[in-house]
Image (spheres, rainbow, N blue to C red):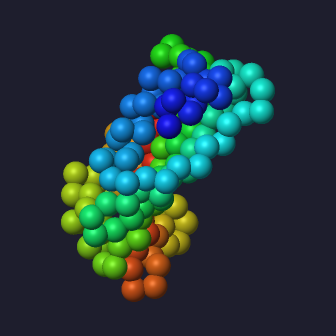
């Protein structure tokens, strides 16, 4: 994926793209869709959508990269997973290191990580959907 970004003209964000892709794929099989800018790729937003297949499940992951800043690239990723457990169990079992925060409005619980990391837990039938979001400045 990093190679595809480079072929599209992305340069400033290549180290961050490579870092994120290694982290998000976690050694699992992936399918990737690239949102490449039609022109001036190294000066515009570059984004990906991925399906990550891991033993026992799958996740959707998205990442976006914007040139600029002190590191040459600002970025964020989100991973979305469905769990058969209720959200209280998911918070306790899958994200024990995060503290419980407020709800966004009525149903989506926020778990607090660092200043730039949050997990959002949304009830989905008998299960729960987790959305992990981290921003890297």
Left or right: residue 134 versus residue 91 is right
- Specify whether residue 79 is in view: no
Query: As displayed, is residue 71 above or below residue 50?
Result: above
Along the line of sight, the residue nearer the viewer: 112 or 40: 40
Query: As displayed, is residue 31 above or below residue 134?
Result: below
Residue in the image at 57% along x and 44% along y: 48
Along the line of sight, the residue nearer the viewer: 35 or 4: 4
Q: Residue furthest bottom?
A: 126
Estimate the x, y position of residue 29 in percent, counting from the top left.
Answer: 37, 54
Q: Residue furthest right?
A: 39
Left or right: residue 85 versus residue 80 is left
Along the line of sight, the residue nearer the viewer: 50 or 73: 50
- Specify whether residue 81 is in view: yes
- Based on the displayed image, in which of its 4 quarters is residue 102 positioned? bottom left
Query: As displayed, is residue 118 above or below residue 68?
Result: below
Residue in the image at 56% along x and 33% along y: 4
Residue in the image at 68% along x and 37% along y: 36
Estimate the x, y position of residue 16 in percent, counting from the top left.
Answer: 45, 27
Residue in the image at 49% along x and 72% along y: 107
Estimate the x, y position of residue 8 in percent, counting from the top left.
Answer: 65, 28
Query: As displayed, is residue 95 above or below residue 69?
Result: below
Left or right: residue 69 versus residue 91 is right
């Amino acid at each position: 994926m990093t190679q595809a970004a480079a072929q599209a003209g992305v340069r400033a964000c290549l180290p961050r793209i490579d870092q994120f892709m290694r982290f998000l794929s976690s050694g699992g099989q992936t399918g990737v869709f690239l949102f490449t800018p039609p022109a001036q790729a190294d000066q515009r937003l570059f984004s990906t959508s991925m399906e990550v297949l891991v033993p026992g499940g799958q996740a959707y992951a998205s990442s976006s990269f914007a040139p600029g800043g002190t590191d040459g690239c600002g970025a964020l990723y989100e991973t979305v997973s469905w769990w058969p457990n209720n959200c209280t169990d998911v918070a306790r079992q899958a994200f024990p290191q995060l503290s419980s925060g407020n709800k966004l409005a009525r149903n989506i619980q926020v778990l607090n990580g660092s200043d730039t990391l949050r997990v959002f837990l949304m009830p989905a039938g008998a299960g729960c959907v987790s959305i992990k979001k981290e921003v890297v400045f």
